[in-house]
Each structure stands twice: as C-alpha cells, then as structure tokens.
Image (cartoon, helix red, strand yellow):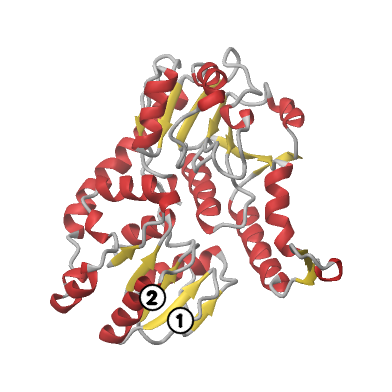
Amino acid sequence: MKIGILTFHHVDNYGATLQACALWTFLNSQGYDVEIIDYRPLKIAWMYFRPLLPIKRVNSINESKKIRINQKSLINISKYWKMRRFLHSHVKLSHKRFYDKKGLKYYHDKYDVVICGSDQIWCIDSFRGYNSSFFLDFVSNKTTRKISYAASFGNTTKLGPYQKEIYTLINQFQTILVRDSNTLEIIANECNKKAIKVLDPTFLIKYDTLKNSPKITNKYLLLYVQADIQPEEEEFIKFLAEEQNLTIVSVGRDEPLAEINLETASPKEWIGLHSEASYIVTNTFHGTVFSIIFQKPFTVFLPSDKSNKVRDLLNDFGLTNRIFSEKSKSELFSEEIFDINYESVSISLESKIMESKKHLIEAILQGETDTKINVKSKQE
C-alpha cells in the first residue's frame, strides 16, 4: 500500500519537522510504502526563506535606510541546513516538488491513501491563510482514501466564508482524526462530520536513535520559547534557576537571560537537550509534548495563540497546574512545582498511544476485507 503524507515539513521549526518525521517513521515501521508529498506553497516557502537572505527590507521614511544587513543570516542558514539535513536523512520525500496547487494534481492518483496532518494545517487565521490543498482537494475519494491524522484548526474557531467549501471537502474524507477538542467541535458543528481526537504523532515513536546528548556538564534549566518572555515570566525563570542552582540554556532562540544560547541546534540536539534537562520552561506545544515524553518537571507560559492546543493537551493528562501563574513562584518553596505524578500520566499516555495507533491503522485499512488490525510493536 502506497501512502502520501501532506503536512508542514519544510518549515524552519523543530515541532513541525519532528511531527512530520514521527508520522512517517511510525507508518514506515508498519511496513507501508510511505512518503511525504513535497509541497511547499510559495507564500509559506518565502516566509521561511526570507530570514536566510543577507539583506532585509525594513519600514523607514528614509529611502536610504530601507535596506539593512541581516545580522542573523548566517545563524538562520545554519539552523535551516541542519533541519533539512535531518529531514532528508530520516524520511522519504516525494520525487517531485511543487510550489503551487496546480502541480499537486500530479499526485491525484499516485497513492492508495493520502493523509493530511499533523500540525495546524487547517488554521485559516494564520499568515498562511486558507489553502484547499491541505483539505486534499487534489485527490479523488473514489480512487484514493482520504484521511487526516492529528490535523488541527489551531486558534481558528469559525470557518466564516470558507465554511461551505471546507464542509464539502471534509465530507469527502473516509476518516477524520484530529489533535484537539477545538478542531473536534468545528468538524462536528460546522462540517456535520464525526471526528476522533488522537495524539500528536511525536508521541507515537521512541527517540533513542534520534537524539544527541548535550555537551553541558552542569544541571540546566532548558528554555524553549518562540515568543517574547514577559517580565514576571523572566523573574520566575531566574528565581527557579537560582534556587535549584541550574544553568539557563536557551535552544532555538537567543535569550539575554540564558547563560548558554544554542540558536542553531539540530533536531537531534534539540531532542537531547529536552531528554537531559533538569527543568523545562516553554511556551510552545511541542516543548510541552517533549516535556511529557521525557517525564520532566516543566512550566508552560501560555500565549493566546497557542492556548487552545496547549491547554487541551495538559487537560488530557491532568497537568493544567503546569501553566504559569503568579502562585507558581510561592509553590517553589515546597517544591510542589517539581512534583509530577508521571506514574499516573504514563498509564494514561500509553493507553492513548495505543488508541491513536489503532485509529490510524484502521483508517488506512478501512474498506479492506478480512484484514486484521495489528499495530506492530516496533518503533524506530
């Protein structure tokens, strides 16, 4: 059986890269001929390519000052190159690459199954806007099984003017597996379709062979953030590090309060840093995911654009107390902030992992006769 995956795989983002790798790795471990469809919408590709350029345009009244040197160019190129090298080393990409929707039609009959997801591929309120390709409009459900896995509308809550078109496309799917409750509700309320909530694909595999141990001798607090840290959050980080004698290490971003900045860490180094941290502070979904995977004490700063998916994930495992609040600082004195009952979390997580795998395999094999659903235990 030949399977194509359509997702955000080409972006300069650890979470997006690792979710694409994880979904491909799991399906490959099940014996499928699977590849990621190398579709890079020009608008998105340009957004991630622009930071690599040595010069940049800025808003200025003075014409002579509208172009400046991009001092981050070499750093961004190094990070981008490591991300691409990791992806090409660990997944199979389709032999053709397309930057527009028209080109995607080449794949209208090349796969038995096409899976869209994971990630916020259905978020129509981001800079990416609405793109019907991510609702698989380029394949026919008469010849190809259409399913989604852990697809998300992100912070979108209403489909607005796109509701009718999305309704039609969603109702051509054989199975819809989504990542969060918000997406579940949109599918039910605006598309009149049943969906099932599953785990992000990064939960489906093991990382023993996908991580590089950090060359840091001291115990450290890992900081993985994608938005500016607020003053009260910075105070919390400093207080925690001082109380526990932890070195502050920032990954993927230069943070002034960090003693070690690893802006250009590879995905393997990023995973290794999470696996050996003494404490993790993040404001990202996948930073939260890997804190749980590696059973780390952690705190989440909850930005408004990620509140739906992060809160939903934490609620599923009874970990909403990991969300930062002013009282978190006082809790440090009793060390409650380090006390996470991972025995209970692990029981719930293992059950959800098996359910998610089962739903995915059943979706792939739906319609096959006399097929026994058997999720292989092998994990790459």
Vertical position of residue 181 compared to residue 56: above or below: above
Vertical position of residue 163 compared to residue 181: above or below: above
Q: Where is residue 363? Give x, y as percent.
A: 43, 25
For label 1, the crowd category at 10 Å Cα-Cα, with few meaning under 14, some 14 to 19 and many 20 or more, is some
> Cβ–Cβ below 8 Å for labels 1 and 2?
yes
Residue placed under numbered mark 2 in the picture: 234
70 to the left or right of 201: right
Residue at the location (52% across, 79% down)? 261
Tell me which amino acid carries mark 1. Answer: Leu
Q: Nearer the viewer, residue 69 or 207?
A: 69
Residue at the location (34% across, 84% down)? 246
91 to the left or right of 310: right
Residue 20: assigned label: none
Q: Where is residue 234? Give x, y as percent.
A: 38, 75
Q: Residue 113, located in which quarter of the rendered image?
A: top right
Is residue 187 visible to us here?
A: yes
- Quarter holding the N terminus? top right
